[in-house]
Amino acid sequence: MKLLEDRIIKDGKVIGNKILKVDSFLNHQIDVELFNEMGKEFKEIFKNDTITKILTIESSGIALACIAAQYFKVPVVFAKKHEATNLDQDTYESAVYSFTKDKHYKIRVAKSYISKSDKILIIDDFLANGNAATGLADIVSQAEAKLVGVGIVIEKGFQNGRRVLEEKGIRVESLAIVDSMNEGQLKFK
Amino acid sequence: MKLLEDRIIKDGKVIGNKILKVDSFLNHQIDVELFNEMGKEFKEIFKNDTITKILTIESSGIALACIAAQYFKVPVVFAKKHEATNLDQDTYESAVYSFTKDKHYKIRVAKSYISKSDKILIIDDFLANGNAATGLADIVSQAEAKLVGVGIVIEKGFQNGRRVLEEKGIRVESLAIVDSMNEGQLKFK
């Protein structure tokens, strides 16, 4: 998606060879107009698929999931990764490994909010090693719902997230794929 | 807002005299259509005010802040309350006391995303003791920006959040004010 790639080039900051900082428009400050264009693009990509619910994970997936949901006219469910006093006891759970923190954390979705008949689109901001998306896909599978695909804003094409997901037969659609960012130079696929 | 009050009565669950569980449409599963109506309502309430940015706090404030921002045509900034590897070192910080966890946590906003000339609307899902809103207002004040008001989805009118904020001269606008929920019976103001 050219609009997004241009924005990443303009406002993204590359730190080292692995960190891409886009918090001026994606995950701290949110450019809601850009998010609307990204939401429309996901709708265009999945226009021939039936989607009944969008699943994401707190915190930074929530914004795009909600904006995109307007074009799909479906509700959003976000998996909790932090302790929440009000969450049902009856949840689907999965363990997600965090590379940055070198530990597993638990993600949870109340069973009432995903049913067998749901056709789920997973949306998240980044795809790197695919751990968060794999955890969300695991929850969809526990609920025996159908996983239509995974929609990602920025995929790090030089990490193995796509391979991990595709080997499980999961469709991956990314709006921008960064192939390399050596020496601060971004290259898109 | 009648649509919201009706929905709280239909789908909210009162636990004891203090907990109102609305995770089927507000803070776990999100009814994006309802959020659009709430966003329009906030725009109507603040139609005579200039707003340049909406400020909220992760996680459950993000969804409404983004949907509402579409009507104000402004960006959203969400304060981080969890450790984030990618956050700038140069941040405004405030300490927020959590009653449920009986401890303080830190909220942070990168200095680049609020400036002196900003006119800020704070949006959050719940107002109880006003601690989160007070922390956000403190950050607006550190940035020397103007705080136009605080927009809340559900205010617990039997707790002192409104009083705390109004004593600081802050305008509070809530879409639904629960006056009491004794014995599972909800009463709105």
Image (cartoon, coloured by chain):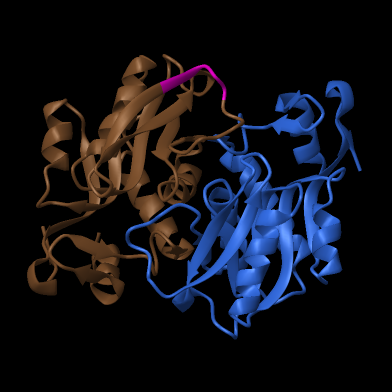
Chain colours: A blue, B brown
Q: Residue at x 54, y 49 (%)?
A: A63
Given residues A56 and B189, the one toward you in this image is A56
Q: Residue at x 41, y 54 (%)?
A: A83
Q: Is residue B139 left or right of residue A30?
A: left
Q: In this view, does B179 lie to the left or right of A66?
A: left
Work out whether B130 lies above or below B135.
below
Count all numbered tags in the image, as a single digit.
0
Work out whether A90 lies above or below B155.
below
Q: Residue at x 33, y 62 (%)?
A: A86
Q: Does the magenta stretch include residue B91?
A: yes
Q: Residue at x 46, y 22 (%)?
A: B114
Quarter of the figure with the C terminus of chain B:
bottom left
Given residues B48 and B29, the one toward you in this image is B29
Q: Can residue B189 be seen in this view?
A: yes
Q: Which portion, as a residue range, is magenta?
A: B88-92
**Where does residue B173 sit, x and y in percent of width and height?**
23, 43
